Amino acid sequence: MKYVLDAAQAKSIDKYSIEYCNIPSLVLMERAALSVADAIMTRSDICGKNVLVLAGNGNNGADGVAVARILGEKQIPVSIYIAEQSDNITEEMNRQLLIARMLNIPIIDKLTFDEDTIFVDAMFGIGLSRNVEGVYKTVADTVNSVKNQVVAVDIPSGVNATTGQIMGTAVKADITVTFGYYKTGQLLYPGAAYCGKILVYDIGFASNAIKTIDKPKFTMDISDIALLPKRRADGHKGTFGKVLVIAGSEDICGAAVLSAMGALKTGCGMVRVFTHVSNKIPLLNVLPEVLTDTYDKEIDWGKLHAAMDWADSVVIGPGLGTKSLSKSILGFVMENTQKPLVIDADAINIISENQSMLSKVKENHIFTPHIMEMARLLNVNPSDIKKDETDVCRLFAVTNKCVCILKDSRSIVAKFNQKVYINTMGNSGMATAGSGDVLTGIVAAFLAGGTESFTAACYGTLIHSLAGDFAAEELTEYSMTAVSIADNIYKVFKEKR
């Protein structure tokens, strides 16, 4: 697990280290500059190249000037271009410029470079709160118009460190050297597309500074799979949990199949599918392991209640449809079960049209909307959600006292106590029909095994994405399907061994 900070939190870490712990700001700046210099020398083909630092007038620019000085002392051809001449510069920038001049580091007043120039983007850091305009926009657009390598200091200039939005324009970096912790805007699109390879360097922030941050966001990768608990050697199918999947309708069978498949391949002991009678034979042809309960034009409510009592966790919504019978099923389930509930797809669409149903939401309920479904839930435009997905997801979870998985190119998981996980695994091949149905089954399997709702949502999202990455390796992002995601879940668990 790795912490992820927004702009205000990152500034707080810096302030705490300097003002409370008395770590000199110039010490942190020196270590930051050494980190960038190290990245350039180890990650770039520096032989025969020259380096041009593009500096602003703030402390990010000061970091860049320090980088120029360090590279210059190592006999690497380097120069500094200060984008905007101004007397309004920070004390640290003034000091770094003085040192650079004393060491005869060239400071140029015209943006000149050749094809062998490596750019170091140090114009704006994480504190940017306005659009990039004027000479800075000209510089950014010029850098983006050529093929030269770009190394960004902390974050590419123009990327909002909190939301990932582009502030008018932004520099497209090949490498971003960030300090201490990931920044939210580096992980969320569109900002993530501007960062290239992100390298996180420890520059000496006080180790206990992170404890002063109230519930920082976090991310995980494949190494975190090792933290999953081991399966009991003396366990049986009841030990590993029972999942009820309420899915499918008269015209739709595949969603129920995929959700059940995701649960089975994630290790739950038993899966029961409650679905329309027309789906029974196709379902059993694909998954003979599942139990089935069916309905036709009317529901046997006693049968459904018994199935919910049998289950340890419940999925509702994939392919369910939004007709009156589907609405009745959803209302009955939300009213009559205390079991952990994964609410997906058509169940979300029904709630969108019947907002009073939100009053039935419980703490162990997990919503799994994609952007369009969330827009319907909140009655807003999708573009409004994209402005700050982490905050939208968190607010929905807090307002409804539940867990929410907001599915997107970078899915976000939030809990009502304001914990937030940002998933950075996965690929574009997962944008395929049925992918979300597999996710519901994976999450439900964790719930059935006794995992707490937020943890189940986080690990479910991670495993789903990693399985997608394995599927892409095998089949490419073009040819993978939802079934191939489910079929590659086992490879994720192999990493645990």
Image (tube, grey):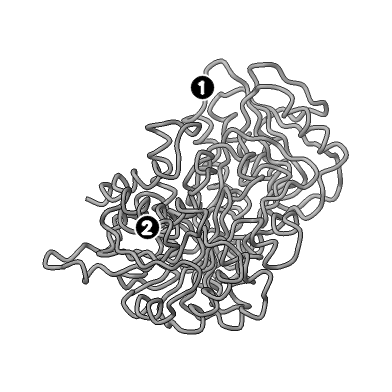
Q: Residues within 10 Å of mark 2 (few under 14, many from 20)?
A: some
Closer to the camera in the image, 495 or 341: 341
What residue type is disc 1 on? Asp
Quadrant of res 447? bottom left
Estimate the x, y position of residue 69 in percent, counting from the top left: 62, 35
16 w.r.t. 147: above or below: below
| Image quarter hosting the N terminus | bottom left
Q: Residue at x 82, y 29 (%)?
A: 109
Q: Nearer the viewer, residue 80 or 348?
A: 348
Q: Is residue 197 left or right of residue 381?
A: left
Disc 2 + disc 1, Cβ < 8 Å: no
Question: Mark 1 highlights which residue?
Answer: 45
Write the residue at 78% across / 31% down: 141
Q: Position of residue 210 (x, y in %)?
A: 50, 67
Residue in the image at 54% along x and 58% along y: 4
Residue appearing at x 69%, y 28% in the figure? 79
Can residue 405 be seen by looking at this rendering? Answer: no
> Front-most of 179 and 91?
179
From this viewpoint, is residue 120 visible? yes
Q: Residue furthest front?
A: 297
Q: Secondary structure at mark 2?
A: helix
Q: Which of the two discs, 2 and 1, labels the residue nearer the N terminus?
A: 1
Give above or below for 237 relative to 287: below
Q: Disc number at residue 280?
A: 2
